[in-house]
Amino acid sequence: MLDFVRTKQKSILIKLVFGLIILSFIIGYAMLTSPGDNSKPQAGSTAVTVNGQAVPFSDFQRAYGNIYQLYQNIYQEQFTPTLERQMKLVQKALDGLINQTLLLEEAKRQGLQVSKQELIDAIAKIPAFQQNGAFSKERYLQVLGAQRLTADEFEEMQRSDLLVGKVREGLQKGIEVGDSEIVEEFKSREEKINLEIVRVSPAAFEAQVRVTDEGLAAFFEPRKEEFRTAEQVSLRFIEFLPQRYVDQITYTDDELETFYRRHMDRFETPEQVQAAHILVRVPEGSDEATRKQKRTQAEKLLADAKSGKDFAALAREFSDDKGSAASGGDLGRFGRGVMVPAFEQAVFSLKPGDVSNLVETQFGYHIIKLTAHQDASVQPLDKVRDDIKRALKTEKAEQLAFEKAMDAYNVNRKGGSLEAAAKSSGLEIRQTGRFARDGAAGPLGRNEELVNAAFLLGTGELGRPIKTERGVVLFALQERLPSKVPTLAEAKAAVEIAYRKEQSKGLAKAAAERLLTAAKGGNGLAGPARAIGQLAEESGPFSRTYSPFVPKVGTSEELSKAAFALPAPGAPLDKVYEIDGFFVAAALKSREPANLTRLDEAQRQQLRKALMERKQGEAMQKHLDEMKKTAKIEIAPQVQTLLEKETQEEKKP
């Protein structure tokens, strides 16, 4: 299928990052309980307070859910929990909420209001609430219901969004883009440079590091705390597994019906369509003549399709989407949020058998035929009865396992005897082995609640039962080892590894600095690099639009800016950069200036629009920064913990 299904456009990210724009509450968010945390806040708890205005934790969840779903759709299976924290989604969501609260405060100060008609018009324009291109009240209530929102709740969100929009419009009035700015922006974007690069690896110098007892001692002494061992504990435990009790479970028909009603969302079938399409691809960067020629070709195909010619045959012969052309343009079944917006809006407005008008996307011109439409629905109880029986038995078995564990705990907690609890329950005592606060409890894995309880547990005490992914655990302390600073002898192996790394980094950096010094004569890096057994590579031509990425180097906005400021071919950078574990020396190989003859009217308009959006964003951010200087912002402890976790992830090598 076409790559437009899951296209990863940098422009989308730029537009939706919450640093410059306020949070927009849109339909389609993922209702996550709490980002990166298994704990559940109390109802009505606050995420952040801005100038005395409390922002509910539920708003933070919704904001996080929006941006989480956005990045998940873009990165798909590559969107891991680690990447989630590295991209600082918690910070983005929090910034969006703070910005929105400050801008709503500004709207109130200015006396701005949103009329009922303005609100109605704005909601009617949202594609998710439309059928056949027109607002549908039935569709509106259906979508809100699926997202567990009332009309009043959503309309209040939309009213806030419109108020913030009015503040934004006021701040951006009078901003203009001059012709000279467009020319300079074109030059900046189109100018290309090619760098000569040497990446010096510290690993290449580890063999040169001399390790002596005196050197290790001098290295270890000021860094003792870095080698401190963490406090550790080990547990003995018994495990109450739900599958042990499944055969004891009984249930009534009433319980089945209650479970079905309580978990009806599990049995929802979302709205889906099946469609075929013909694509006339328009290559990126095509001039107006090419676009016109492609549109003419698409219009002829559209006329053929609407006149009753075999759509599948037309797709097989003429569609540029080779992934679907062989099957007559068939794209299979899909729901909302899968295709790019223009395509989605068109296909969901069709009736089965209908052929669309031309639909333009970044890929070209599409002609779409809807072959089937399935409304959102809930599967009836009788159809999913067996699934419900299994799920209910599992749920009741989990509850019974917890009750058995609580019984064992209550009977034995005064004596603190895990042996007695194990004997009465017919279970075997197992051990976790030693683990630290940031580690996993052996076979029980990483369970934050269990780890926290283990480190608070006293000798001779039973820990209160805790649910894990597998079942329920009843546990007692086996051993506690306090944190301590080791002697050099105890930590010698770890100290030597750290010492070698530190020394080899110094040697690598010095070698890279010598390369830059040798290149100051203007002859580049290739010769000096060969002299010390290093390889000089070329980055290949790249423009500022790559920033902060530099080919063959990695991500470094500072290096990118410095490289474009180099005066002439052969000139080296004025310092070495440490990037992704390498020390990078670079010199300018060649420069390709922008060709101003390629700046046509279409590009001028695109650049004018981009510059206007940038300047408007900068004006908005400047005003927000000023407001934040005097604002009193108090972040709730739970959100602060999430921010700290993101920061810790960012610092990891």
Image (tube, rainbow, N blue to C red):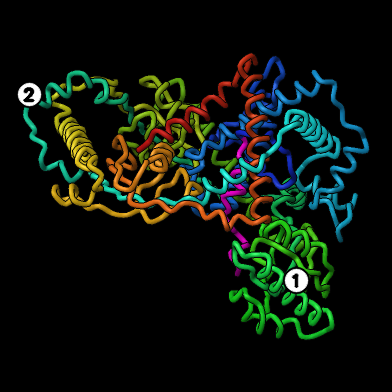
**Distance CA(mark 1)–CA(mark 2):** 76 Å
**Numbered circles on residues, count:** 2
For mark 1, give the secondary structure. strand
Frontmost residue, 589 versus 113: 589
- Which residue is identified by label 1? 368
Q: Chief secondary structure of the magenta span?
A: helix
Q: How crowded is mark 2: few (under 14 residues within 10 Å), some or many (20 or more)?
A: few
- Residue drawn at x 69%, y 80% as measured from the top left: 315
Image: 604 above or below 480: below
374 left or right of 222?
Answer: right
Screen quadrant of the C terminus = top left
Frontmost residue, 409 versus 98: 98
In percent of width and height, residue 329 lies at: 67, 76
- Residue drawn at x 91%, y 32% as measured from the top left: 115
In percent of width and height, residue 339 lies at: 67, 60
In percent of width and height, residue 497 lies at: 18, 35
- From the image, state whether disc 1 or disc 2 is nearer to you: 1
- Residue drawn at x 6%, y 26% as measured from the top left: 213
Residue 444 shows up from this direction? no
Q: Which label's residue is closer to the chain start, 1 or 2?
A: 2
Q: Quadrant of residue 636?
A: top right
Circles 1 and 2: CB atoms closer than 8 Å: no
Q: Does residue 247 show up magenta in the picture?
A: no
136 left or right of 506?
Answer: right
Q: Give, as a three-letter code, the residue at label 1.
A: Ile
Frontmost residue, 55 versus 403: 55
- Which residue is identified by label 2? 214
Give the magenta range.
1-18
Instruction: Single out the residue that lies furthest toward the right.
Output: 117
Q: Quadrant of residue 231?
A: top left
